[in-house]
């Protein structure tokens, strides 16, 4: 029961792939100033194709960084409106010598397309664009209303799109967002991500003496900021992974029994994960919770770096005047960044040892998000995926954040359908990034069928 | 009762000072490769003056770094032999804009001579050299046998002299060393430093996952090396400054009652020290011990830096594969570096939390040292100092290490008389380093009289 749009997609697949390769050849590395023009070139490439396909109001929206690409097609009266999101910028390709083929010369090998951006996110953007082309070409219309919004700063924090979304522009009015920047839980297993952890990223700055001192002369009298930080951090989380901030867990909304049961049936081997993915001698974290629960549905606390003092080779005996710890917490549904930070800050100030001043700063936040699986668009997505992949969809969460999903929710009141076609071993942000060619093809078909089902 | 050598020194003082200024104009910054020639120039300047004065066997001894300066005068039959030590190299002068006069243009102001190296250690080296000149000129002989050994790498670790001393060369045979690189406890208060703390400088490297991981995806499962280090450090020392390594304090030889009583009578105000010198809101350290006891006669533990992970501005959510803590301990008489390191290493390995591998490395050691005050050369020094300064000598210790003092003891069996004439506010290693002009003058007289008394 293939739709005419799916048939069109199959007939034109070879061309779609060549077009994707052309897009991948543009080194649109958003973090490197010398590639600023390449970022614009990639945006123009996408915009030109949207125009050619028949999307309307196509334009670049300027930001302080790289431009957004916008286009719409709003002629499906009484049908829902989708906000289709992806990003055309990519990570730097280093280390170059680990690539088996050049990062910006897309190469087919073993059923995969290798290139920087192949899966993150140009391949998935192109699957969205080509799904739209197939629908427009086969039917001379789209089954739903569509606005596309692609950004070029996802790999550098997404400030431009965040500001634009926060301004609540009328041309982002939609019923749901379609975000294609995620992956299948396992090959061949249709997957929707329906939950993301939130976060607070903080700095604890500890100051002791007014200036750096010599540990010979002053050791035993001057407070040591690193020792104080160690004492604080050791009181933030115990050795069983339990976070000790009073009230930290109080408002958590746990996953339902059904969700937990579904996670237990996922193809996941903790020992294999420990060995191949993490490579540590033992996994850590709260006892009584599986790895998927711990990384998807439990709050966690990590330290990312401790700047200050002497970090060179050899022995310098400084008692630094100050030291800092970069500490973040991942939040789960029920927790808010503001309340969590308040609890954390007041606890850190209380446990600070004698002799030091402590400054607790909030650097960055993100809201946790959870999309109810009975949402009509999620349901439409599962019908589409079942048809294309021949299997029931699995609902997973991600332990990370996709800030734009929170922004769509908070500023536009729009829930996201996170439908992506990457694979866990696609080497995102690493050498030899790839996109499975079959997933590119079935991804386009899934997106076509999803938009058709969303109209039902 | 001034000796003829003292009278000679007074009559020639203006010339001595001009010569010192000439030495100070040579920017012999040992740590900067572009000043390598200046270091040699300073060594040659000192050697030429030793030759002119009548010292014998004067030569530069080459090392892998900057040369040593040697000279001797060994004609005092049946008298003891002194090994006179100082260093001609200096610290870099940065930050330059905080100097009130150029660091390498010695300037007299308010009874002080301002220049980089004024007190550390060219001024004190020159006091030694001019004491020898005065004795040679006034008596055509020295009252004792003297070997001088000046180095040019004190500010960069002193490897050259350490290797030379370790080779136990016959031309370093001596009965005692005269080290002039210390200070008076207070202005006008003749001071001998008779104890130094030892040290072990270590690194604790903690490794978790095989590669850096994203704290969103892996937080709650992957071990965090910084959290592990914090837990380890928090178990090394409690909040009252007590070190928790089992057996750590077992072999300490405490100061005598007399020594403690003498320290209590020193002009020292803990509150003033807290406010002006340390500038922290509270001093820390073991309860029941004074600041002088804690910094001179108690072992301590400090953390100097914690390299690894993300230390830039902003928020990067990495769980680093590894992190390191630079941890040093100061040792007191009775403790040995080898035994202390063994206790520490085995304890750290025992308390390491689950999930991480720990590597405890020894980077550097130094022995604690204590010179008995009834030593005949210490007694000779107190007689000399009393005559010149009109007051009894105070015996102090230093919380730091002077590695060469340990080397002289260990390799040559030679005890050191640490007789120096700096002041606590002389800005060593800082802008506006100075040497009090009166201390330069009385320093020369003290050194002359000491060598005369050592012959008695």
Image: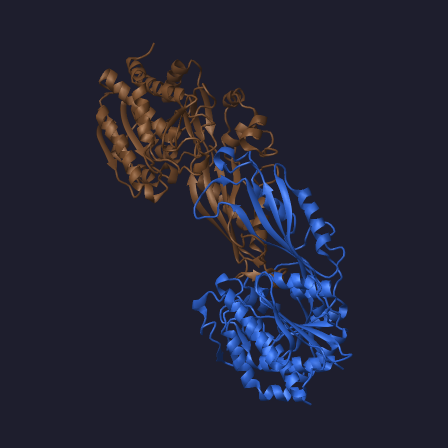
Chain colours: A brown, B blue
- At a point 62% along the width and 88% down the height, the residue shown is B8
**Splitting the image into 4 quarters, where does residue B410 fall?**
bottom right
- At a point 63% along the width and 64% down the height, the residue shown is B161
In the displayed structure, B15 sits above or below A193; it is below
- At a point 61% along the width and 49% down the height, the residue shown is B203
Residues B441 and A294: in front is B441
Query: Would residue B339 be found to the left or right of residue A415 on screen?
Result: right
**Splitting the image into 4 quarters, where does residue B61 fall?**
bottom right
Q: Position of residue A328 (x, y in %)?
A: 49, 42
Tell me the quadrant of the picture where the C terminus of chain A can be found. top left
Tell me the quadrant of the picture where the N terminus of chain A can be found. top left
From where the camera sits, is residue B434 visible?
A: yes
In the displayed structure, A6 sits above or below B288; it is above
Q: Position of residue B65 (x, y in %)?
A: 57, 62
From where the camera sits, is residue A352 visible?
A: no
Residues A256 and A159: in front is A159
Residues B408 and B346: in front is B408
Q: Position of residue B84 (x, y in %)?
A: 66, 73
- At a point 57% along the width and 57% down the height, the residue shown is A316
Q: Position of residue B264 (x, y in %)?
A: 69, 71
Residues B23 and A60: in front is B23
């Amino acid at each position: 029961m293939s739709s005419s749009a799916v048939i069109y997609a199959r007939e034109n697949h070879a061309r779609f792939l060549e077009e994707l390769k052309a897009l991948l050849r543009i080194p649109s590395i958003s973090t490197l100033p010398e590639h600023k023009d390449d970022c614009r070139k990639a945006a123009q490439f996408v915009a030109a194709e949207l125009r050619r396909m028949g999307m309307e109001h196509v334009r670049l929206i300027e930001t302080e960084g790289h431009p957004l690409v916008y286009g719409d097609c709003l002629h499906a009266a009484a049908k829902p409106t989708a906000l289709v999101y992806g990003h055309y910028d990519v990570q730097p390709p280093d280390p170059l010598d680990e690539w088996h083929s050049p990062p910006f010369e897309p190469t087919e090998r073993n059923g995969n397309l290798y290139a920087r951006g192949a899966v993150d996110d140009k391949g998935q953007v192109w699957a969205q664009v080509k799904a739209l082309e197939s629908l427009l070409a086969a039917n001379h219309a789209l089954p739903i209303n569509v606005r596309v919004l692609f950004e070029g700063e996802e790999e550098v924090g997404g400030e431009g799109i965040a500001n634009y979304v926060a301004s609540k522009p009328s041309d982002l009015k939609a019923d749901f967002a379609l975000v294609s920047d995620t992956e299948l839980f396992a090959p061949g297993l249709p997957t929707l991500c329906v939950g993301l952890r939130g976060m607070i990223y903080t700095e604890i700055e500890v100051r002791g003496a007014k200036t750096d001192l010599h540990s010979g002369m002053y050791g035993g009298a001057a407070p040591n900021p690193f020792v104080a930080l160690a004492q604080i951090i050791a009181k933030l989380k115990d050795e069983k992974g339990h976070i000790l901030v009073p009230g930290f867990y109080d408002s958590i909304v746990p996953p339902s029994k059904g969700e937990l049961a579904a996670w237990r049936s996922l193809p996941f081997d903790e020992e294999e994960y420990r060995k191949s993915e993490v490579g540590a001698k033992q996994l850590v974290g709260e006892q009584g919770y599986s790895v998927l629960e711990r990384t998807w549905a439990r709050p966690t606390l990590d330290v990312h770096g401790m700047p200050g003092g002497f970090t060179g080779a050899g022995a310098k005996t400084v008692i630094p005047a100050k030291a800092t710890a970069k500490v973040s917490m991942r939040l789960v549904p029920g927790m808010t960044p503001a309340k969590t930070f308040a609890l954390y800050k007041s606890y850190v100030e209380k446990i600070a040892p004698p002799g030091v001043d402590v400054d607790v700063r909030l650097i960055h936040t993100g809201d946790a998000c959870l999309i109810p699986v009975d949402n009509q668009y999620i349901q439409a997505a599962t019908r589409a995926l079942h048809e294309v992949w021949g299997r029931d969809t699995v609902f997973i969460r991600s332990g990370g954040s996709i800030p734009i999903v929170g922004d769509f929710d908070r500023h536009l009141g729009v829930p996201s359908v996170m439908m992506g076609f990457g694979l866990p071993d696609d080497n995102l942000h690493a050498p030899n990034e790839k996109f499975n060619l079959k997933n590119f093809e079935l991804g386009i078909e899934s997106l076509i069928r999803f938009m058709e089902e969303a109209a039902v």
